[in-house]
Image: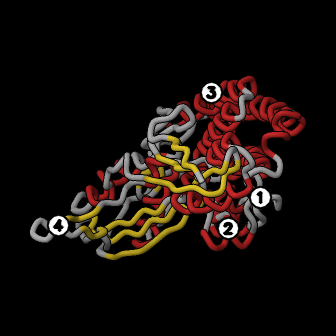
Amino acid sequence: MNVVPIGPIHPILKEPLRIKLLVEGENVKGAEIDMGYVHRGIERIMEGKHYLKCIHLSERVCGICSYIHTQSFAECIENMCDIEVPEKAKYLRVITCELERIHSHLIAAAVYNLTIEHETLGIWMLNVRESIMDLLELITGNRVNMGFNVVGGVRLDLNKEILDTLHKKIDEFEEDVKNIIEAFETGPLIGMRSKHIGKIGYKEIMKTRAAGPVARASGIPESDWRLRHETYKALNFKPDWRNEGDNYARMMVRHDEVLTSVELIRRALEHYAESSGIVRNKAEIRATEGEWYNEAHRGEVYYKIAITDGGLIKRIIIRTPTVMNLEAYKYMIKDCPTIADAVATYTSIDPCVSCTERTIQLKDLNTGKLSDYKI
């Protein structure tokens, strides 16, 4: 048994992480994952700060899925303090969140295609993604850290010009992305490098508590937290899922979700047009604590917050899906015949290291003993 090290700095890694592949020849038998190269401790930084500052900091948990973190932070406090959110704001959140989900899935798919040496399809996806980034900028004023959500609603309403552009660009994007999906489905290279590679079954998914498209590609549609969200219930949301549990299924679930997001945006625009009034209510904060779940683009994101009467954050826990999906990866690679397949399988889970590495350890200066920081 030999060890093939990948990372922490490596061309296939978007962020620093060390993977030690255990191999016999080219056959991958297992893996060890070392983390801790992007330590930040965001939860600890938030303590004692006003929630208005912390909602901006939550948007820095991840660059690709920054929006869903501010939405989850805001919805957690709104639920805790019984703050009513205007109908228009609820549908604006869906529109913006689903646009971000599209651009996140397209990045994941593009990186996967580049990993299996299909550069044409990878660059094509990144090019189509730009139209979605333009729409996010049109709605919020920014392409990444958008600062759009506030406790009680959203910052800005849409005018007729923006609405007309949204309808037009979404129609154009849908045609482009359908062509991309067809190319992926029918490509012989993609099938050879993706089907029956990196398989993981229902039992292993449940054991590792894997989330998002990783879980839904192995036959667990109920893993999608949008099924439990009241606004998505009003939009008759139905999750996308498959049973194969391999690299191909994980990428196809994301492709299917892109088209589902397009349809959700159209429905949300219809509901938005039927709504009237403001997009933001005054937030009255009281000392309390609570928790909230949302479906981030990689899976379940969880916020637990304790807050004071003055709006200061006493404690906060943020849990993101990559930590569970990395555990599932250890089962996937047992079905990888080559090192190259293990690398592609790692990419297929769409890992986010910056999302995951926010924990800190406390060191006793007298004894040198390390302990995890906990609420």
What residue is pinned by disc 1? 245
Tell me the quarter of the picture where residue 44 sits. bottom left
Is residue 2 left or right of 58 when viewed as pictured?
right
Q: State if disc 4 and disc 2 touch (CB < 8 Å).
A: no
Q: Residue at x 69, y 53 (%)?
A: 271
Q: Position of residue 27 (x, y in %)?
A: 70, 49
**First in residue order: circle 1 vs circle 2:** 2
Badge 3 is on which residue?
130
Q: Looking at the picture, which amino acid does disc 4 mark?
A: Gly
Question: In the picture provided, is 192 more to the left or to the right than 338?
Answer: right
How far is the residue under mark 2 from the one under mark 4? 37 Å
Verify CB contact (< 8 Å) between mark 1 and mark 2: yes
Q: Marks 3 and 1, how far apart in space?
A: 30 Å
| Crowd band around label 3 with a 10 angstrom C-alpha radius: few (<14), some (14–19), many (20+) | few
| Among numbered discs 2 and 4, the one appearing first in the sequence | 2
Question: Do the numbered discs 2 and 3 sit on residues whose CB atoms are within 8 Å?
Answer: no
Residue 2 x/y as whole percent:
57, 49
Q: Quadrant of the C terminus?
A: bottom left
Q: Under tag 3, what secondary structure?
A: helix
